[in-house]
Amino acid sequence: MAFLQLENLTKRFGLQTAVDGLWLGVEKGEFVSLLGPSGCGKTTTLQMIAGFVEPTSGAIRLEDRDLLAVRPAQRGLGVVFQSYALFPHMTVAQNVSFGLEMRGVAAAERTRRVGETLELVGLGSFSERFPRQLSGGQQQRVALARALVIRPRILLLDEPLSNLDAKLREEMQIELRQIQRTVGTTTLLVTHDQAEAMALSDRIVVMNKGRAEQIGPPYEAYERPASPFVASFLGKTNLVGGVAVRPERISFAASGLAGTVRTRIFQGNHWLYQVETSSGLVTVIRQNTGQEMPAEGAAVHLEFPALHEARGGGSQDRRGPKS
Amino acid sequence: MTPPSLLDISPATRLGRGTRTPYLLSLPALLLFASVVVVPLGMTVALSFHDWGQYKGIVPVFILKNWHEVFSDSYYGEMFWRTFRIALLVTLFSAVFGAPEAYILNRMKSPWRGVFLLVILGPLLISVVARTLGWALLFGGKSGLVNAVLLSLGLISEPLPFMFTETGIVVALTHVLMPYMVLAVWAALQRLDPQVENAAITLGAGPFTVLRRIVLPQAMPGILSGAVIVFALAASAFATPAIIGGRRLKVASTLAYDEFLNTLNWPLGATVAVLLLLALVLIVFGANRWVERRYAQVFG
């Protein structure tokens, strides 16, 4: 039995089915992402675990105990909300301390743990500020500290980075992963950002229309997508002659599928090409190695990997690189 | 001096006529304000220093007789004290009933919220006089509807005292002024992130703790600004105290009215009116400053 177990979890709002018979087991210490477009049921799933939404049917078991029988306030979960939901009338320290107060932790112990957790998220010197006086990234860290300080059994993250700008988001991804590794808390992340899900998670649950289309490690889901939806949602994909081929697997060669470069976009570490061919528009990604690349309008030939390779990986690296 | 750049969009530069244009544009409004507010107010203040006698009428001299009378005669002290006691009680009851009402209203779903908002704001569409007379019809003496029913049922032997009592004034004024409190608190609650309550719950807070530690502190600026409005309106209210309190139970505004129109002692009436205005301005500005300073850091 897994640490956290979702069993045939279903939620209907009127005629609409938000979550449709979801099965998922999360191991202790694991970082799992629920990934999918808006309306796929990922947030509803998180809310059912947190206790804000009552499931229509199915069960949630935590350490083999029925979680649905426990009131939300007693579940002992740490939640980081998309809006951070900090208490605006309390200082950073008071925000973080709140959960400990509710647990009746003694004042001295509270001060110690609040200080420790704020150090962990790099906000040691901000304890007396009010949320309004902090940047978005700093508020995010406070929200994370507030959820972690109670030593939650599970950390639930609801689109925690979506309100940050791109650069900060990348920094926070790395930091979030480091913190999670340090503390070792079992974590469930809800996101619509496939890069974020792949960067952070041990396993991804790709959701579509309330169902899990694929559950697996990021590398596996990317290399061996279980459905066309997963293939198109995780990164870019070409459908050439009925076969899905990742753009970075296609190369320019002396012979092969003939085509004309429609557009060429430089993206620093790689070039993004749209090539007009007899089997439609093909997206090609080539690494920037400093060599001269075909210009727009140039006639090119595309070389495709062998079929088994196109589906992803050789047989010797089925399990993907060790992370 | 550098010429103004094209990006400089301060109104004066944009209008291109120096700094005079904005003043010229607001001149009509300023003239109206001066003629119907500032001038009469100045005249009232001047009036409070004039003399008055039963047979000589108003004598335009500068004396402190009226002010001396108001401050030395305990009758006026008692009346001002009553005025502010009533205003304070009305403010308190408005907050106690209005704040929860606003919270419930804020949590209601779409059709009901509109219906109950109308129920709360509806009374504002009816004249204060009509609303207060309603209370008089229900509780006025033996023939008042509620009293008549209770008497005939034998539940009370004497009609409930309501007319000409402070209780009556407080009840009727609270009813009249509560919508202002509800609106002020509601405005504050609408700025509240709905997830904040969920956040507190996940941290282990029970429903009562969430209300006391999370919702109430955030509603406080709304409650305080509502309190300032209700207090000012209650202390200066005229119609309700005039109908319920009548001549027997006077407050500052009804006293000023009586001095002006019945005793015809305009200077004394003006003194009472100016004193009420000064006291209110001091209290309202003081409270406002305090609220702003107290919450600047938190809510900005």
Image (cartoon, helix red, strand yellow):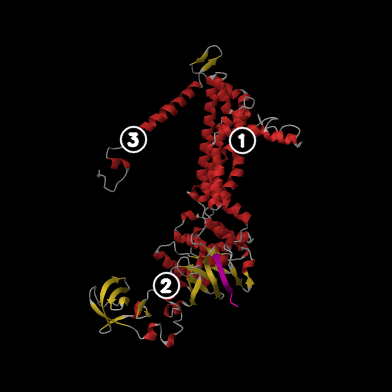
Mark 2 on the same chain as mark 1? no
Q: Are marks 1 and 3 on the same chain?
A: yes
- The answer for how far apart the CA atoms under marks 2 and 1 are is 64 Å
Q: Which residue is mark 3?
A: B25
Q: Could you say whether the residue bearing mark 1 is in a helix, strand or loop?
A: helix
Position of residue A68 relative to residue B212, above or below, is: below
Frontmost of labels 2 and 3 is: 2
Which image quadrant is residue B129 in?
top right
Report the magenta stretch's main SS: strand
Q: Which residue is mark 2?
A: A233
Sort mark 1 into few (<14), some (14-19) or many (20+) by Cα contacts within 10 Å. many
Residue at disc 3, secondary structure: helix
Tell me which label, 1 or 3, sits earlier in the chain.
3
**Residue A137: quadrant of the picture:** bottom left
Q: From the top left corner, tell me how far across and down residue A55 is, in percent.
A: 58, 66
Can you see residue B113? yes
Q: What's drawn in magenta, residue-wise?
A: A1-12
Q: Quadrant of residue A184?
A: bottom right
The 10 Å Cα crowd at callout 3, few under 14, some 14 to 19, many 20 or more, is few
Say which mark, if any, is on residue B172.
Answer: 1
Q: Is residue B167 magenta?
A: no
Compared with residue A228, is residue B184 higher up or lower down, i.e. above or below? above
